[in-house]
Amino acid sequence: MNDVGNATPFETGAISHPGRVRAHNEDNLVLRPEFGLWAVADGMGGHENGAMASATVAAALEAVGPASSAADLLAQLEKSVLAANAELRRQIRERAGATMGSTLAVLLVHDTHFACVWSGDSRIYLVRDGRITQVSRDHTEAQDMIERGLLDAEEARRWPRRHVITRAIGAHELPELELDSGEIEGGDTFVLCSDGLTDHVVDAEILSAAQGDSVQGACDALLALTLERGATDNVTVVIVRYHHERRVKTRWMPNMRRPRSDAP
């Protein structure tokens, strides 16, 4: 990892790994702390299609630049997501309707405002005052069943269709995004992750790791725990901590993706 860019009030850690079972990594991540943007994308549709889908989304987000306001930053994100969705729809048509898409979980911060934007089952958590809150809502059949009272959370973890998602970038002609926003506070820590983490690690364990001194150390610890438990999917973790009243050199990686042989 290298220190790059200007000092920001954010400390960023990130890691991505294929896991123990899959030979290839279909996850991608985007880290733009200088512009107040962090994202995780998890591709679907098989190795080639899934990897291309998440890479297409990640590449589109690289177009986001300096913003004059929180509304401007959100508008730039929307433009990038629309461009990625259009490109994926074009690829699907060229491939005779091939299954292709990507989840997306994004954290945006401008001044004291934050917004969490997502589609699919990649998650965003907020750790504040010693508590962890899942900001995002999974766009999955399992979550829909929970909300309808047909499954409880434990049953949903074992349900055969628990990984069937109901929203994704590229799945429809217009992408379906959900948003939550608020005011950021000193010490706030955001965790963005693909479902390869939450399949094996519970919220209390994410909280424990995220409260450590080093956000990169927390990412490494969560990956190690996932690998220890079998890591049946690709796993990606991005952790962002806001340091009010001080600016830190943000340590980050344009796309830190470890090969399967490089386990911690």
Image (tube, grey):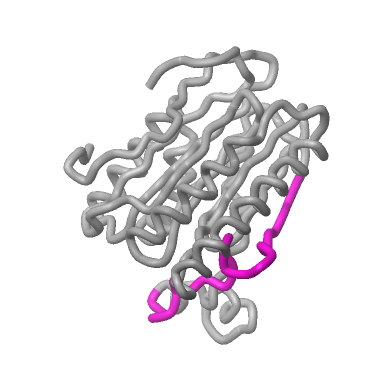
Q: Quadrant of residue 23?
A: bottom left
Q: Residue furthest bottom?
A: 150
Residue at horizontal 67%, vertical 27%?
Answer: 186
Above-or-below relation of 253 to 107: above
Residue at horizontal 48%, vertical 37%?
Answer: 210
> Can residue 163 be found in the magenta stretch?
yes
Above-or-below relation of 189 to 135: above
Chief SS of the magenta region = loop
Q: Please indicate whether residue 82 sits to the left or right of residue 233 in the image.
A: right
Residue at horizontal 51%, vertical 38%?
Answer: 30
Above-or-below relation of 36 to 19: above
Q: Please tell me how many numbered marks the rendered image carries.
A: 0
| Residue 255 image offset from top left, x and y in percent | 42, 35
Residue at horizontal 50%, vertical 59%?
Answer: 102
> Can residue 250 be found in the magenta stretch?
no
Between 68 and 173, the one lying in front of the other is: 173
Residue range corresponding to the magenta coloring = 158-181
Q: Please indicate whether residue 205 sits to the left or right of residue 80 in the image.
A: left
Q: Please indicate whether residue 8 sits to the left or right of residue 99 in the image.
A: right
| Residue 170 image offset from top left, x and y in percent | 57, 63
- In the picture, which quadrant includes the N terminus? top left
- In the picture, which quadrant includes the C terminus? top left
Q: Residue furthest left?
A: 261
Above-or-below relation of 105 to 9: below
Between 53 and 256, the one lying in front of the other is: 53
Q: Please indicate whether residue 220 sits to the left or right of residue 151 in the image.
A: left
| Residue 75 image offset from top left, x and y in percent | 77, 43
| Residue 229 image offset from top left, x and y in percent | 25, 56
Q: Quadrant of residue 146?
A: bottom right
Between 168 and 159, the one lying in front of the other is: 168
